Amino acid sequence: KQRYQRRVRGSLREGYIWAEDKEHCEEYGRMLQADPTKVSARAKKRGLPQLGTLGAGNHYAEIQVVDEIYNKQAARRMGIDEVGQVCVMIHCGSRGLGHQVATDALTEMERAMRRDNIVVNDRQLACARINSEEGQNYLKAMAAAANYAWVNRSSMTFLCRQAFAKLFHSTPDDLDMHMIYDVSHNIAKIEQHMVEGRQKTLMLHRKGATRAFPPNHPLIPVDYQLTGQPVLIGGTMGTCSYVLTGTDKGMQRTFGTTCHGAGRAYSRAKSRRNLDYLTVLENLKQKGISIRVASPKLVMEEAPESYKNVTDVVDTCHGAGISDKCIKLRPIAVIKG
């Protein structure tokens, strides 16, 4: 129950995170409306043994090297001082618990749609009125799943720091393993935004999208008040990833939102049919990228060819002014769950 309600406080007390980690999390690592009683027993059962794990799909942990710095001042605020600096990027979420929360909600919302005469084209778009019992139940369960995700990522951050410290016979602090930011990419939240010149309260759902708040926004850490919120954009295991920053223009045009990643070019099934496991591994080896993967099929599904060009996507966001390029990173080691 504590994992769903008090993410950072509990992890901090137990020594799994540093005090500054809490400040460098979206929502400071805790959604207050979380209610674990709205999370089903099956969801909790699925989530319990998965705490501290990556999961499959496009989730990963990568050791990366800074390849380019576009904004030296912003990068310095994040602790990035030079090209060649080593970083670790972790991409994961609420695992089976979050999946089950969504599955349970679909069943409830389908009943609510029939009752309220709501019609959609696809079952996956099932919905309910925000202030209905079903809507409120989902938001409380989703917030609990988000808190679980923050605990999950903080657990892996702890393990990562310990692994580096052991390998280099040092300490995480001496290795300067500070967390830049922890940002969500599939979450619905109530936020205040300007609409037609007036401030309004909105329910904003970022699905496959990332929050990107601008400089001087009250909900971002003091460390980033002058630069804007860091935005982590994962690429593919054979190309590159980016760190962007939020902008005022993005706040005005997209409610403080930008892309999450490249997006798929091929479906998982098409990737398995068209790509060869050994060829993908050889291509990664030639680029100097080591990989550890739980299942061979994941190599094809997550191959660079399966995704759009992340640089094109990031350049589009940068050109549109909804987020600014700050750092480019290239992978040298990839772990897939």
Image (tube, grey):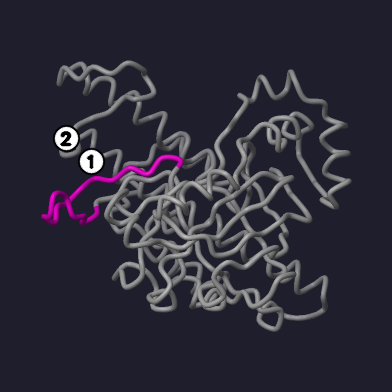
Kindly give the residue lying farthest to the left in the view shown: 198
- Say what secondary structure mark 2 lies in: loop
Left or right, 265 with reference to 290: left
Q: Would you say the residues marked 2 and 1 are in contact, meaning their CB atoms lie under 8 Å apart?
A: yes
Percent across and percent down for residue 76 are 56, 78
Can residue 101 be found in the magenta stretch?
no
Percent across and percent down for residue 144 are 38, 49
Amino acid on which disc 2 is placed: Ser
Residue named by callout 2? 132
Kindly give the residue lying farthest to the bottom in the view shown: 174
Residue at the spot x=60%, y=44% of the render?
310
Residue named by callout 1? 136
Q: Quadrant of the C terminus?
A: top right
Q: What stretch of residues is rendered in magenta?
A: 191-208
Quadrant of res 306: top right
Distance CA(mark 2)–CA(mark 1):
6 Å
Left or right, 101 with reference to 140: right
Amino acid on which disc 1 is placed: Gln
